Image: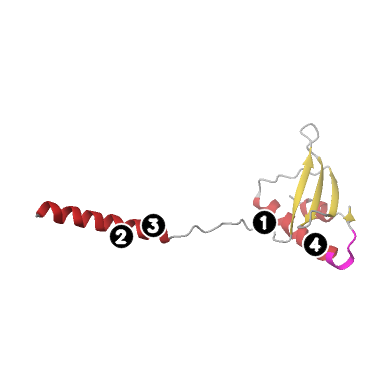
Amino acid sequence: MRKYTFILVCTSMLIAFSMNCAAQEEKIFTPKWISPNGYWVVESNIKTPLNSIIYFYNNDNQVIYKEKLVGIRINIKKRKTLMGLRKILEASVAAWNTKQSPGENRLLVANAFKSH
């Protein structure tokens, strides 16, 4: 009788734990530097790290702003850089929504990262 009670208790606990694990849902984590309005791409070269081109796109994959940087190194591994690029992207998307023409070389990125 003891053996059957032990098996019954073990199986009921196993069922209870498996139901608890199945009820948990995974949360999707999105970093703060990811913008819901678009994305950016940094184009650079290993041989000339101080020259790069940054493209800003909206969610429709249209170029909304492009800037060529000369003499400024962009380190996209730094959080401060990523948050700065997000801020410029948000401003570019807002400007794009008002006039619908792509901007180019207004020195938004150069002025933001000149002091870094």
Per the picture, the main secondary structure of the magenta-coloured stretch is helix
Q: Which mark is residue 16?
A: 2
**Label 1: few (<14), some or many (≥20) within 10 Å?**
some
Q: Going from the N terminus, do you reach mark 4 or mark 2 first?
A: 2
Front of the two marks 2 and 1: 2
Q: Say which residue label 4 marks.
A: 93
Q: Going from the N terminus, do you reach mark 1 or mark 4 first?
A: 1
- The amino acid at mark 2 is Ala
- Residue 80 location, x and y as percent? 67, 53
Q: Going from the N terminus, do you reach mark 3 or mark 1 first?
A: 3
Based on the displayed image, in which of its 4 quarters is residue 53 positioned?
top right
Q: Say which residue label 3 marks.
A: 21
Based on the displayed image, in which of its 4 quarters is residue 88 positioned?
bottom right
Say left or right for 35 vs 13.
right
- The amino acid at mark 1 is Ile
Compared to 54, does 92 lie above or below? below
Q: For marks 3 and 4, give the CA distance.
A: 42 Å
Q: Say which residue label 1 marks.
A: 34
- The amino acid at mark 4 is Val
Asked if the residue under mark 4 is in contact with the one under mark 1, i.e. CB atoms within 8 Å, the reply is: no
Q: For marks 4 and 2, give the CA distance.
A: 50 Å
